[in-house]
Amino acid sequence: MPPDSTSPTDRPPRQPWVLWVSAAVAVWGIALLLVAIRVCLHPEKNSVFPVFIEAGQRWRSGADLYLELGKYRYSPTVAAFFAALSMIPRGLGAILWLALNATAFFTGALLWAKDLFTASLRKPPLAPTETAAVLALTALLLLPMSLGNLNNLQANPLIIGTMLLAISAVHRRRWNLAALCITIGAIIKIYPFAIGCILIVLYPKKLAWRVAVVLALALLLPFALQNPHYVWDMFHKWIVSLQEDQRLDALPTDSYRDLALLWRVWIADNLNPFAYQLIQACAALAIGLCAFAAHFWKGHWRHTDRLAFLSALVVCWIMLLGPSSESATYILIAPVAVAFLLRSFLDPLPKYHRALFLAGYLIMVMASISVWFPFSRKFLTCGPQPFGAILVTLALLLWRLRPVSSPRIPPANP
């Protein structure tokens, strides 16, 4: 056969989806490589990893995990996990923790986003190559709101990753995996269990007993690893520390980045704690009632959209009215903001609807980027992050109220 005489200029150009995927892999690959090198060489610098390691060391020695209010706010089970990491070189432990967080975050976020994109009302539906391109764009848009968490070795990527994995597992009828992911998120911090509660309300027969069993095992495991009296005391102190660390009376610079901050900065200096707790409870009750309504009355609400909307609404509640929304916590809303922003361009929606998603995302991105500048503390005190979360929440509600003419897709048996 004659040799191939096709010149490089005669070859067909690369498909756009290949370019998007290549760009996402290259950008994130370089970013994670640089972070891995940094945390390996300097795991104690600009990182919360020493807090986790100290908790693991305290667990091994039977010392108080919650001696200093607000320093360690995770469960005793997490301390038992870090007891193992505290026995290996600090740099290696930091890389393993980074790998666990990054894997959970990307797997959960991209699977959840894929489910949301494939349920789009776009005509014709997305082709596999188009879905790959949109997922690559999703990964790129997640970068500014998530890289700081990974760089600081926070647990938030693991939390939101497992929660989104639980939703994707429910979508695929993987009930045991969903129960495991719900438990992992809840055992790190209590508030992610709110998403688990919504999933249990939607599918009680499939999830209720599974979550109960796995959660019971996770709570009992520490008692097999340490003195039971010590473990019981640590669980009690964990709950007490969460109740005491509300920060409603703290200075705005030290307050949580939630709806209470916006009230205190822009409306009134004081905030009645009971009234605020009542607002928190009423908002949570409203979301719960929405879940009950979705369970008993499906109408034309697609199965995927029902899961995505309710879980996104819970994430917005965690950001605005949850128990401990710090600047780093806003990585939890990043997949919601990005995925629904891109979904708004796939669905036939009004321009103002897309503008709300875009404005909310950009405001929160500016807040995330501002931490690299000296004025960040003053800027974040003004509440850009909760304001962006309000815009995303409003856009979500409008998205749910949009007219839907597509036929109903039968959901899974609850």
Image (cartoon, rainbow, N blue to C red):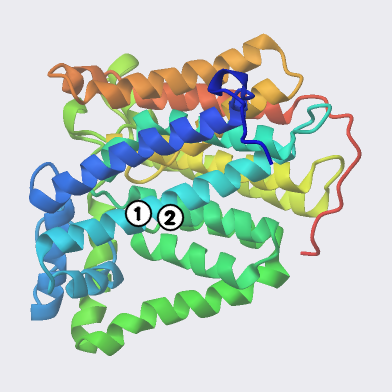
Q: Secondary structure at mark 2?
A: helix
269 and 251: which one is in front?
A: 251
Give the residue drawn at x 60%, y 30%.
Answer: 17
Crowding around mark 2 (Cα neighbors within 10 Å: few <14, some 14 to 19, many 20+) is: some
Determine if residue 73 is in view: no
Q: Secondary structure at mark 1?
A: helix
Q: Are marks 1 and 2 in contact (CB under 8 Å)?
A: yes
Position of residue 143 in the picture relative to residue 281 (left or right): left
Give the residue drawn at x 53%, y 28%.
Answer: 19
Q: Residue furthest top?
A: 351
Position of residue 133 in the picture relative to residue 254 (left or right): right
Residue 101's mark?
1
Determine if residue 98 is in view: yes
Residue 287 at x, y percent in the picture: 61, 44
Residue 214 at x, y percent in the picture: 50, 77
How far apart in space, not on screen, are marks 1 and 2 (Cα)? 5 Å
Quarter in which the C terminus is drawn: bottom right
Residue 122 at x, y percent in the picture: 78, 27
Q: State the residue position of label 2.
A: 104
Residue 224 at x, y percent in the picture: 29, 89
Position of residue 138 in the picture relative to residue 347 (left or right): left
Hey, which quadrant is residue 124 in on the image? top right
Amino acid carrying label 1: it is Asn
Give the residue drawn at x 38%, y 77%.
Answer: 219
Crowding around mark 1 (Cα neighbors within 10 Å: few <14, some 14 to 19, many 20+) is: many
316 and 129: which one is in front?
A: 129
Hey, which quadrant is residue 318 in on the image? top left
